[in-house]
Amino acid sequence: MSATAIVSSPAKEKGATDDITVDLYPFIREYKGGHVERFLRSPFVPASEDAAGNRGVATKDVVIAKSTGVSARLFLTSRAAAAAAGERLPVIVYIHGGSFCTESAFCRTYNNYAKSLAAHTGALVVSVEYRLAPEHPIPAAYDDAWTALQWVATLSDPWLADYADSERTFLAGDSAGGNIAYHTAVRASRDGRLMDIEGLVMVHPYFWGSERLASETVREDGVAMFPPDLVDRLWPFVTAGHAGNDDPRINPPAEEVASLTCRRMLVAVAEKDSMRDRGRQLAAHMRDCAWSGDAVTLVESEGEDHGFHLYNPLRATSKKLMESVAQFVNQRSALPLPAAMLPELHELHGYGGNKTSEEGETDDCDQLTLSVPARPYIDIFGYGMAMKNWSGRKSMETTSRIPEGPLPEESHFVLGNRENIPASRITTAMSRGRAAVSRATGGATKETRARGTGRAIAGSTTGRGGQLLLIKCNLAGAEEEQEQD
């Protein structure tokens, strides 16, 4: 998402709701006649086989099925390719998130994430471009992911033929992509002839149900990336009204989980995510159904919400999550990562983040936890803060571009969770953005000062079409420079 000013949603304006048939803002909105408007998206970026100019990762796009448009972007690190020296690389078939109806394998967010995934794991990453709802309702996305996995198994692409180790194939995805990856693994298990899946990685997977689990209740602060009432309306929308929230495709039965034949699995959840307990529940089902306990790894990121690693990739918890995935992929021995202590299924119905002992004392849940970092908050793409603003205000808001050229002095903007920022400060931040970003990402050592709490500068670089990429930080050095203006 580009840097934006937050303004009232068009749905709030007089008469603007007359043509809206489905309103799932800030993701998507459908109008009479079938026109849809997608809000959660980032600019498309081209592929480049020039690894040297692309941070050591070559990328290329391939068409998998002309009849449906299923395609993929492949990511190959030059260092991994050179180091292979005859030893083939693991393959990660990655399926992007976006509530089944937004985003793309070719957009900046997922291009950057898949590139980072390839760099950290040394794997050949195949990021799948699948058809989106509502134009192509579920099960189109499932069918497209299966088509992509079948194509990978053929090793028909030169990169796959030269570098891929088909015996180390992983299915991975986040949010809706985690759900699709799961069902692709189920289909591969039932087929039994295509290929063996080494591992399944699901980050903040989208699963749901009509019966509320603890994490699906309204939070005390009223702020959630995925408010439960919005999630309740999503699945009926992406299935064209043919399924409700007890559909086994989002509430898988234990016997289906038991049918999985992949060797091991990692489930990552975020403490503040409404879908957290669904991920924990799935991991617990895996443990209780024919799965060896040490083949299931549960990773929880403390203090974080859904998809934080995408919109805030430089945050320490994002880096630790990536390290966990990389270690999981590159585990070559029979023993996987140490498994987390999974909850009993009955505990999830009242689970609120901690366990209560018989004496009434509350103990931390014994699991692999990635704690909140002390390093100041850096929001790269603006996804998280924009969505939290919308959710916390309980009002309909949308985004608009900051216009090109000089900003009127009387203009004021809302950036993230800060209101009424004068245009003069935005203009100043634009001129100083690159320097601020350099300091922020270079690991500044100064401590954030108490007087800087709650303050931020907005640094930016201009992007395609006059859009801006905002970087918010509260590093002391950046604040000092801001105060000197």
Image (spheres, rainbow, N blue to C red):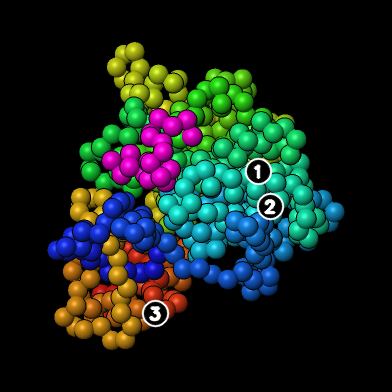
Along the viewing direction, whichever of 40 and 109 lies nearer the viewer:
40
* Residue at numbered disc 3: 466
Residue located farthest toward the top when viewing the structure as drawn: 358
Q: Is residue 371 magenta?
A: no
Quickly name the residue at label 1: 170
Tell me: residue 46, above or below residue 281: below
Residue drawn at point x = 69 percent, y = 33 percent: 191
Classify the position of the N terminus by image quarter.
bottom left
Q: Nearer the viewer, residue 88 or 184?
A: 184
For the question of whether residue 11 can be seen, the reply is yes
Image quadrant assignment for residue 362: top left
N-terminal-most mark, 3 or 1: 1
Disc 2 crowd, CA 10 A, few/some/many (<14, 14-19, 20+): many
Which residue is pictured at 19% across the width and 83% down the height? 409
Q: Which residues are magenta?
A: 229-249
Query: Could you say which quadrant of the image residue 49 lies in?
Result: bottom right
Distance from disc 3 to disc 2, alpha carbons, whole Å, reads 35 Å
Binning the other alpha carbons within 10 Å of mark 1 as few (below 14), some (14 to 19) or many (20 upward) gives many
In magenta segment, residue 235: yes
Q: Could you give the CA–CA distance between mark 2 and mark 1, rounded to whole angstroms?
A: 10 Å
Q: Are marks 2 and 1 in contact (CB under 8 Å)?
A: yes
Q: Position of residue 39 (x, y in %)?
A: 36, 61
Three-letter amino acid code of the residue under disc 2: Ala
Residue labelled with disc 2: 123
Query: Marks 3/1: CA distance?
Result: 38 Å
Q: How many numbered discs sit on the rendered protein?
A: 3
